[in-house]
Amino acid sequence: MSEVLFEARGVHKSFGDLHVLKGVDLKVKKHEVVTLIGPSGSGKSTLLRCMNLLETPDEGELLWQGETLGYRAMTPAQINGHRARTGMVFQHFNLFPHRRAIENVMEGPVTVKGVSKAKARETAFQLLDRVGLADKAEAWPAQLSGGQKQRVAIARALAMKPDVLLLDEVTSALDVELIAGINELLADLASEGMTMVVVTHDINFAKRASNRVCFMDEGRIVERGLTEQVIDNPQAERAREFMAALTG
Ligand SMILES: Nc1ncnc2c1ncn2[C@@H]1O[C@H](COP(=O)(O)OP(=O)(O)O)[C@@H](O)[C@H]1O
Ligand SMILES: [Mg+2]
């Protein structure tokens, strides 16, 4: 059995009176792609944000390679270090609008890791090339299509040399003809061994690229298993209804 890279145990998170995560357990092994699927509002984004420490869990443990993260007592530098190894990519890209594509990719290595600008630029260019945007390095975000912006955002996450990518509905804001290209890129990264947790409603992508699927409902993972099993033959009633609606 391969090594567990990252684990959430009994994670709870509330916003005021709203209890969003109600004890989530999730193990992610090295080189594995785990898809998180479930209705809007079930807590998928909150779970990824807790794993990345964009949110602080109220309760529960996060373990990195078997070691408990003392997330309540971490310094800002330790939190940044954790965010660097758990690269997050968002639905709405979140690029800096006043920075060129390549500057967006360089930003993290320069400011968080102290990499020289020259070295960061060289690496950023290689990454933009890797995501198919070598010719757009000097473009402003406003000059890029949604698909191109998302490629920049993926390159920006990769620039931090993450051990796992946390991808939150990264194709949901894209025109349909741009989705396949991003899915292709993610599937390539997965086949190169990148560990990923992918929130998506894209059943075809999940089937193609993921090893395991977790179905979330109302703050809990109510079903988990191998991809084909959970998507084609879910046992939990809520999962059955959801998959039936998604697959039409
Ligand atoms: N920062 C926040 N403040 C208040 N409520 C939030 C916040 N983030 C998420 N929520 C609420 O938590 C619930 C779960 O949200 P989310 O994790 O985004 O679900 P999903 O990604 O599955 O759609 C929703 O009801 C949402 O409105
Ligand atoms: Mg969400």
Image (cartoon, helix red, strand yellow):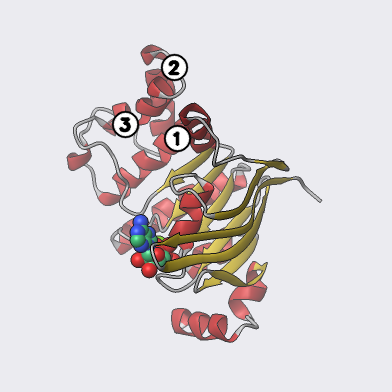
Give the quadrant of the C terminus: bottom left
Secondary element at tag 2: loop
Q: Is residue 239 above or below residue 56?
A: below
Q: Residue at x 51, y 86 (%)?
A: 241
Q: Earlier in the sequence, mark 3 or mark 1?
A: 3
Q: Is residue 87 above or below residue 112?
A: below
Q: Nearer the viewer, residue 237 or 23?
A: 23
Residue type (three-letter) at the residue carrying disc 3: Asn
Please tell me in which quarter of the rendered image ligand 2 is found: bottom left
Mark 3 CB lies closer than 8 A to ligand 2: no
Q: Residue at x 38, y 22 (%)?
A: 111
Rounded to the nearest angstrom, the CA distance separating label 3 from label 1 is 15 Å
From the viewer's perspective, is 100 left or right of 203? Answer: left
Residue type (three-letter) at the residue carrying disc 2: Gly
From the viewer's perspective, is 146 left or right of 215? Answer: left
Q: Residue at x 21, y 37 (%)?
A: 97
- Image quadrant where residue 154 sits: top left
Q: Nearer the viewer, residue 53 or 164?
A: 53
Rounded to the nearest angstrom, the CA distance separating label 3 from label 2 is 15 Å
Secondary element at tag 3: helix
